[in-house]
Amino acid sequence: MKAANKSGICALILGVFILVTAFGAFLIYESIPFFKREQDVFLSGVRQGMDDNAKDYPGKKQFLTANANIFMYGGNTAFGNSAEATRLASDFSTVLDQRCQKNFTGGSSFNPSTGGHFLTYCRLTSGEIVFLCHVPDLSSYHDIAREMLAGTAWSSAWYVAESEKIKPGTPMIVGLSGFPGYGPIWEGKVGTPPTIRGEGPNEEKRLYPYFIDSR
């Protein structure tokens, strides 16, 4: 009797094992198309990014020249296309640094590319204003924190622009970069919330037109 019970229990365990194994195999089979789609989307983005890098968009060369100023810390934290723009960049860097220290904690203290500074380039023309900022350890900001960082940068740019008597309604764009490239890029007008909020390598080209001299 005991032997029969053991035999039944073994059969039950074997049956459960077979069912679990079959169910697991089914889940793996069903997930293959999903992962393939995700892979295709990723590779498509990479290819798109490579194609964009190869194209010579209007304003791209001027943007890359300006952006090179904030690629690596070399003693200065603020740059611009004029003395006034450089002053705006310095004010933005200081304000954003202070607000981030107040609102965010954590992250890496090792930032060889920025030296822990918010490296900023400002381009100011009669009709537009641009802030490019290399943020220390940008990759450590995720989800809500990343959104808050972008919002803090936008409000800081707004504050600095108005403090320097930049006319409300002036078109403004703020781009935050880190490793391996640009993250949040918000666009709108001085004195108002942003109308475009984007992020990613394919968004970088929205900055190029702001660097066209004849724009």
Image (spheres, grey):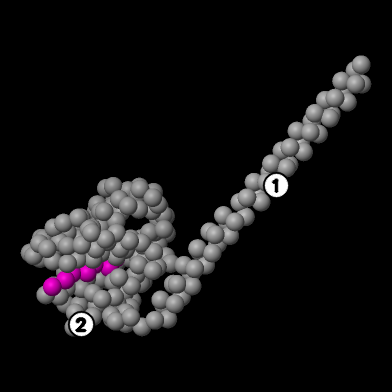
The x, y position of residue 192, in whole percent, is 16, 56
**Mark 1: amino acid:** Ala
- Name which quarter of the figure residue 159 lies in: bottom left
The x, y position of residue 75, in whole percent, is 30, 71
Q: Is residue 102 magenta?
A: no
Q: Do labels 1 and 2 touch, CB within 8 Å? A: no
Circle 1 sits on which residue? 25
Report the magenta residues as a range.
127-133
The x, y position of residue 91, in whole percent, is 18, 63
SS for callout 1: helix
The front one of 149 and 195 is 195
Our reading of the magenta stretch's main secondary structure is strand
Q: Is residue 164 left or right of residue 184?
A: left
Q: Residue at x 20, y 73 (%)?
A: 123
The x, y position of residue 86, in whole percent, is 19, 72
Which numbered marker is on residue 213?
A: 2
- Name which quarter of the figure residue 7 lies in: top right
The front one of 113 and 132 is 132
- Name which quarter of the figure residue 18 lies in: top right
Q: Is residue 131 magenta?
A: yes
Q: Quadrant of the C terminus?
A: bottom left
**Mark 2: amino acid:** Asp
Q: Quadrant of the N terminus?
A: top right
Within 10 Å of disc 1 (Cα), the crowding (few <14, some 14-19, many 20+) is few
Q: In this view of the protein, can residue 120 be seen by the observer?
A: no
Front label number (1 vs 2): 1
